[in-house]
Image: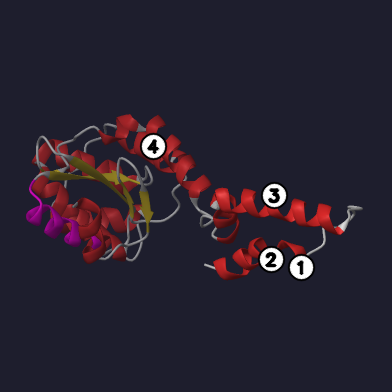
Amino acid sequence: MRWPAILAVAAFPAAAEPAGLDMTREERAAFGKEVRAAVLSDLTPIDRALNPPPIDLYGQNREADLKRLEDSEAVFAPTPRGIGADDPRLTILFFESFPCAECSAAWADLETLVAGHPDIRVEPRFADAGGPAQLLLSLLDHQGPTAYHAARLALHALPDATPDSLAALSRDKGWVQDRMLRLAPRREAEAFARLDLDTTPSYVFPDMMLRGSIPLVVLEKYVK
């Protein structure tokens, strides 16, 4: 803090002549005393000028994120796909696409996170509404969450998600997909776009969004 220079000016006001003021020596001395008294009576303006608050470069973006989250509250509703607490203190949405090599490792970290924090819940969500999403929900309906999550890992490992590759994998795994089209993938993909997310994996907390794969040690800090 540069107080010495400021206080020196206040202590010796006669050394600095007020610009543009036609004063006698005595008037300048009186004026200087008044300035000194005013400065010393409240140093807050000087402190504020010398030590301005840091500029929050991301404040505007954060406020926009919070507004989008408020408008997308319904997407946090629990589903049979979620893992963790039934009545959680914190729910994290995990947006993924298929295939996605990073998504598989990121999900494994989330399983570890849930094991260490049994009062939280993680809900997988689809970033797009393509064939993999419909296949997974068909398996969820007919074979349950265990089959759903096993299929997720297999789909992440695919080199692509073309109809031919999905059909070949389904035959190899013995998966049977019904013909019913489900609304969940489309609604979740719309939420992904509405939240202005563009990367998978992405993590959505009730009060913030994280884009890209996040190390487990960092996620730990956000759930405590």
Q: Does the CB distance between marks 1 and 4 fall below 8 Å?
A: no
Q: Tell me if I can see residue 144 in this picture.
A: yes
Residue at (30% x, 62% y) in the render: 214
- For label 3, the residue is 34
| Mark 4: secondary structure | helix
Disc 1/disc 3 C-alpha distance (Å): 14 Å
Could you tell me if the residues under marks 2 and 1 are in contact, i.e. CB atoms within 8 Å? yes
What percent of the width, then of the height, locates residue 93? 27, 45
Alpha-carbon span between mark 2 and mark 1:
6 Å
Say which of marks 4 and 3 sits in front.
Answer: 3
In percent of width and height, residue 98 lies at 32, 55
Q: Amino acid at mark 2?
A: Phe
Residue 15: which numbered mark, if any? 1
| Gap in angstroms between the C-alphas marked 1 and 4 | 59 Å
| Residue at image mark 4 | 69
- If you read the primary sequence from the N terminus, does the residue marked by circle 4 or circle 3 appear first? 3
Q: Is label 4 in contact with label 3 (beta carbons under 8 Å)?
A: no
Q: CA distance from mark 4 to mark 3?
A: 54 Å
Judging from the image, what secondary structure is the residue with disc 1 in? helix
Label at residue 12: 2
Residue 183 lies, with reference to residue 201, above or below; the image says above
Magenta residue span: 105-118
Quarter assignment of residue 77: top left
Residue neighbourhood size for the residue with mark 1, other residues' Cα within 10 Å, grouped as few (<14), some (14–19), many (≥20): few
Which of the two discs, 4 and 2, sits closer to the camera?
2
Compare marks 1 and 3 and give the one earlier in the sequence: 1
As for residue 54 lying within the magenta part, the answer is no
In this view, the residue in front, 157 or 70, is 70
User: Reading the chain from its start, which is encountered first: label 1 or label 4?
Assistant: 1
Query: Which callout, 4 or 2, points at the residue further toward the start of the chain?
Result: 2
Contact? badges 3 and 2 (CB < 8 Å): no
Residue 183 shows up from this direction? no
